[in-house]
Image (cartoon, helix red, strand yellow):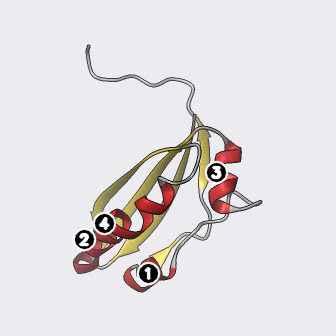
Amino acid sequence: MIVRTWVAYARPGNARAYREHVKGAVLPQLRKLEGFLGLSVCEAERGDRVEILVISRWASIDAIKSFAGPKPERAVVDPGARTILSEFDDFATHYEVLLEAADRQ
């Protein structure tokens, strides 16, 4: 499994709007892609803005390319998100998951 991370920033009032945008517009499209395994949106207050960390999970780098194109490190930021976010990275970072642990079971 590959995780793809991406960072953006929003004004406090827009962070919720971004989450709603992801739920309503982005996730339905991602769920149609073969190899998409899931998504987490994390937030941390950073003074007068909110840092947003998006972590998506993919079966392979080829699955990521089906989403991002031939340059998978390129960030994909749709027009709706661009109007909500105040700043965002132009790149994403990928990590191969070598160990994953869940809560005690």
Give the amino acid at mark 1: Gly
Q: Residue 3's spot in the image, x, y percent?
A: 54, 43
Q: Nearer the viewer, mark 1 or mark 2?
A: 1
Q: Residue 14's spot in the image, x, y percent?
A: 28, 78
Question: 25 above or below 43?
Answer: below
Question: Quick one: label 3 or label 4, which is nearer the N terminus?
Answer: 4
Which structural element holds mark 3?
Answer: helix
Quadrant for the C terminus, please. Answer: top left
Residue 80's disc is 1
Which structural element holds mark 1?
Answer: helix
- For label 4, the crowd category at 10 Å Cα-Cα, with few meaning under 14, some 14 to 19 and many 20 or more, is some
Question: Quick one: label 3 or label 1, which is nearer the N terminus?
Answer: 3
As measured in the structure, the alpha-carbon distance from the residue carrying label 4 to the one carrying label 1 is 12 Å
Q: Label 4, on which residue?
A: 19
Q: Residue at x 37, y 65 (%)?
A: 22
As measured in the structure, the alpha-carbon distance from the residue carrying label 3 to the one carrying label 1 is 21 Å
Residue 105 horizontal side relative to residue 71, left or right: left
Give the amino acid at mark 3: Ile
